C-alpha cells in the first residue's frame, strides 16, 4: 500500500516536479543526491513558489524519525501496539519512508484510505462483531434479543441464517446481525459496561465503531473525514473493546 518510489534530482525544477506529483497524487517525494536519498520535498511546500526554482531549495533533510522498517504492521490488534498508526501519530508524521535494504517506498495519510489499508481495519471490526455476538448470545437468555428487531429485520435475519445453513455454514442466528443491530442490542440490554469504558464513553465508542465499519465497507475516506489523531484514537478504542470482550 506504499506509493511507488519516484525520486527527483536536486536540479529538478518546481514546475516539472509539481506536475509529476499532482499527476500521481504524491504528497511526498524523495530527492536522490550522489546516488542516495538524503532529502524529500512535500507537494504542499511547492505550491505558490516560483515554478523555475530548483526543488532542493524547498526540500527537507531525511531524519531518522522519517524512516520505518518494512516489518512494522499497519495495524496490530493488540492495544498499545507499536504499529504504523501509533508510530506515525506519536511522531506527528503525515508520512513515513519504508526501509528494507534501502528506502523502498513511502506511506502517507492518504494511503490509509486505500483498499489494502481497509483489510486490517475490517479484520478488527470482524473481531468485534464476533465477540459482541458471543456476548449477546451468552448474556440474553432464550434469544430474547430478537424481539428488539422490527418484523422486517427479523425476517431478513432469519433469511440470511437459512441461506447460510443451506450452504452448510456453522453459525448461530445471532451471527447474522449487522454492526448497527449488534450495537443497538448491546445498548438496549445494558451490556455496554462490558466494553471496557464508562457507559457514556462506551456509547460513543459504539458509534465510532459503526461509522468506521461503514466507511471501510463502502471504501470511503477515514483519514480526512477524521483528523489522523482522531482516526488513531478510534482504532485504539476498537482494540480496547476487542480486548475487553475476550
Image (cartoon, rainbow, N blue to C red):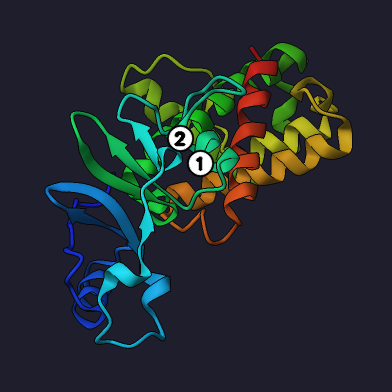
Q: CA distance from mark 1 to mark 2?
A: 6 Å
Residue at numbered disc 1: 88
Residue 51 in percent (x, y) is at 28, 87
Q: Locate the N terminus by quadrant.
A: top left
Residue 93 vs 100, above or below: the answer is below
Q: Is residue 149 visible?
A: no
Residue 191 in the figure: left or right of residue 135 = right
Q: Residue at x 77, y 43 (%)?
A: 204
Q: Residue at position x 84%, y 24% from top?
A: 193
Q: Is residue 229 above or below residue 80?
A: below
Specify the quadrant of the image occupied by residue 236: top right
Instruction: Using residue 90 as the reference point, say whether residue 42 is left or right of it.
Output: left
Q: Which mark is residue 84?
A: 2
Q: Quadrant of residue 139?
A: top right
Identify the image quadrant of the C terminus. Answer: top right
Name the element at disc 2: helix
- Give the quadrant of residue 166: top left
Between 228 and 56, the one nearer to me in the picture: 56
Secondary structure beneath dot 1 equals helix
Q: Is residue 243 above or below residue 95?
A: above
Residue 163 in percent (x, y) is at: 38, 30
Amino acid at each position: 500500500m506504499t506509493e511507488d518510489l519516484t525520486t527527483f534530482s536536486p536540479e529538478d525544477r518546481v514546475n516539472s516536479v509539481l506536475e509529476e506529483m499532482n499527476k500521481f497524487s504524491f504528497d511526498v517525494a524523495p530527492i536522490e543526491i550522489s546516488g542516495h536519498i538524503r532529502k524529500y520535498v512535500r507537494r504542499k511546500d511547492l505550491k505558490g513558489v516560483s515554478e523555475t526554482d530548483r526543488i532542493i531549495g524547498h526540500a527537507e533533510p531525511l531524519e531518522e524519525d522519517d524512516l520505518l522498517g518494512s516489518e512494522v504492521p499497519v495495524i496490530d490488534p493488540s492495544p498499545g501496539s507499536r504499529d504504523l498508526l501509533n508510530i506515525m501519530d506519536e511522531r506527528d508524521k503525515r508520512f513515513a519512508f519504508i526501509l528494507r535494504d534501502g528506502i523502498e517506498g513511502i506511506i502517507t495519510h492518504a494511503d490509509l484510505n486505500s483498499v489494502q489499508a481497509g483489510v486490517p481495519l475490517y479484520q478488527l471490526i470482524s473481531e468485534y462483531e464476533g465477540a459482541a455476538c458471543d456476548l449477546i448470545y451468552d448474556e440474553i437468555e432464550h434469544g430474547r434479543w430478537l424481539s428488539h428487531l422490527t418484523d422486517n429485520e427479523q425476517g431478513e435475519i432469519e433469511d440470511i441464517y437459512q441461506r447460510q445453513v443451506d450452504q452448510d455454514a456453522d453459525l448461530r442466528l445471532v451471527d447474522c446481525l449487522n454492526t448497527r443491530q449488534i450495537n443497538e442490542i448491546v445498548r438496549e440490554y445494558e451490556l455496554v459496561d462490558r466494553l471496557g469504558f464508562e457507559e457514556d464513553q462506551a456509547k460513543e465508542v459504539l458509534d465510532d465503531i459503526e461509522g468506521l465499519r461503514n466507511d471501510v465497507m463502502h471504501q470511503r475516506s477515514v483519514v480526512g473525514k477524521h483528523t489522523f489523531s482522531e482516526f488513531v484514537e478510534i482504532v485504539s478504542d476498537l482494540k480496547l473493546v476487542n480486548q475487553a470482550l475476550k
